Amino acid sequence: MEDRKIFLSEKEMPCAWYNVLPDLPEQLPPPLDPKTGKPVEPSVLAAIFPQSLLEQEMSAETWIEIPDEIRRVYSMWRPTPLHRAIDLEKYLKTPARIYFKNESVSPPGSHKPNTAVAQAYYNKKEGVKRLCTETGAGQWGSALAFACNIFGLECVVYMVKVSYQQKPYRRVLMQTWNAKIYPSPSENTNYGRKLLSENPDNPGSLGIAISEAIEDTITSKDTKYSLGSVLNHVLLHQTIVGLETEKQLKLLGEKPDVLVGCVGGGSNFAGLVLPFVKDKIKGKSDVEIIGVEPTACPTMTKGPYRYDYGDTSGLTPLLKMLTLGHDFIPPGIHAGGLRYHGLAPIVSLLVDKKIVKAEAVPQTKAFEAAVIFARTEGFVPAPETSHAIRVVIDEAKKCAQTGEEKCIVFNFSGHGHFDLSAYDAYLDGKLQDYEYPEEKIRESLEKLPKIE
């Protein structure tokens, strides 16, 4: 019988995260102070982040050791299995070999605890008592609630209102782990109250929720802000995914020809691909790396590479990234984790340098792929993950036409157990596609800060 799962022992779990910054093709543009246009002073960032994470954010070290206490918590679910999608291959009649790294086996059901546990640990070490954050689909919020509960920290989550309404069980999961959740925009912050006075039906966005979480942070005692994607230290923590995948593929004598991941802010995608990027940058590998986003929020495929705020109200420093504009409010598609206006600076640079390819798919095509995957492999994917599966299936079909025996690997970044209302809408034929109008994108981009 063919092996469906490739496991590593707990002893084989990586002891260090991989920091891609020293290996990038050029230095990452620094965060800028919007008032001066100059690199932001560390003291500004220290108001919302602990010192240890700021050091990781700017580190020039290639390897950063994972503390034993973090590895101990990781061992609850790590190393995660690498699956061979044998029945999907048979269904597609493809000679391609398809593998997926199953990050849905964590307690919150996604890749997000890889950084949530690390962030809670470092904040706790520095005496922080309360963490504020935002969440889209609820994967990040539930991961941080889980991590804060382990380390005895208070957790406050601003959840994008449309997702708060679509995904009530994510809220219940966070509350079970002792977190407090506000639908964003909320009545709990000045910025939220302002937006609600302008539009009581505001569906919210990740940019708005970030603004609320940061406002709460800087106006509260013993509180820091925690971000689940985009920043360098977040991507750093996620590289444990790709490092384990490397080891598992080597056990099989495999080298990936194609790596695929869904992309919102960029954390799960970067976690899988960054350990493989080094050789591609140096010309030692020709692996094809594909990031997949929704057509409703086309940051990679239609956004310019510019300096912009990470939030809607302009509280954050300016980051150089692919962006649709900080006041961009995407439609309420079910892939709530892919509705962010910007993209991690590291991933943005890699896309700009054409080291990484970008594709956008509509949500009905993503759900079509999700149902095919569930009916062949058994696992019900999160709507976000389904975007990656769509492209994996398309790549495998190309192999069926050409006869190429490619090795295709993707990150199964989360399960869809709390997203069944979206599946219900798809199966009833009620799910609609949405391609964001070009004129709306242009309107948002006109408000970008005048810094190149």
Image (cartoon, helix red, strand yellow):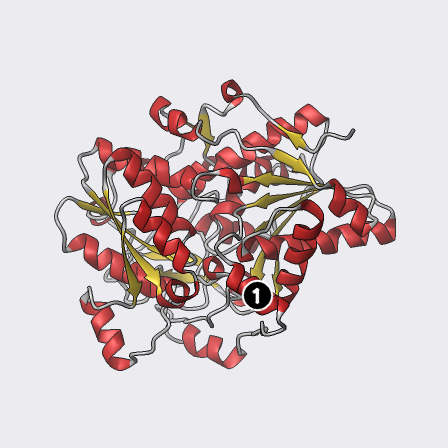
Residue 274, quarter of picture: top right
Q: Is residue 312 left or right of residue 276?
A: left
Whether residue 357 can be seen here: no
Whether residue 209 is situated above or below residue 128 in the rendered picture: below
Residue 67, quarter of picture: top left
**Nearest to the observer: residue 238 or residue 173:** 173
**Nearest to the observer: residue 341 or residue 424:** 424
Whether residue 368 can be seen here: yes
In this figure, which residue is indicated by the disc labeled 1? 424
Residue at (67, 24) in percent of width and height? 251
Circle 1 crowding by C-alpha within 10 Å: few under 14, some 14–19, many from 20: few
User: Residue 366 location in percent, x, y?
Assistant: 62, 61
Residue 148, quarter of picture: top left
**Nearest to the observer: residue 14 or residue 182:** 182
Q: Quadrant of the C terminus?
A: bottom left
User: Residue 247 location in percent, x, y?
Assistant: 61, 26
Q: Is residue 66 left or right of residue 400?
A: left
Q: Is residue 178 left or right of residue 443?
A: left
Q: Quadrant of the N terminus?
A: top right
Extreme-left residue of the structure: 221
Q: Amino acid at mark 1?
A: Asp
Q: Secondary structure at mark 1?
A: helix
Counting labels gives 1
Residue at (44, 61) in percent of width and height? 340
User: Residue 194 location in percent, x, y?
Assistant: 22, 74
User: Residue 450 location in percent, x, y?
Assistant: 35, 69
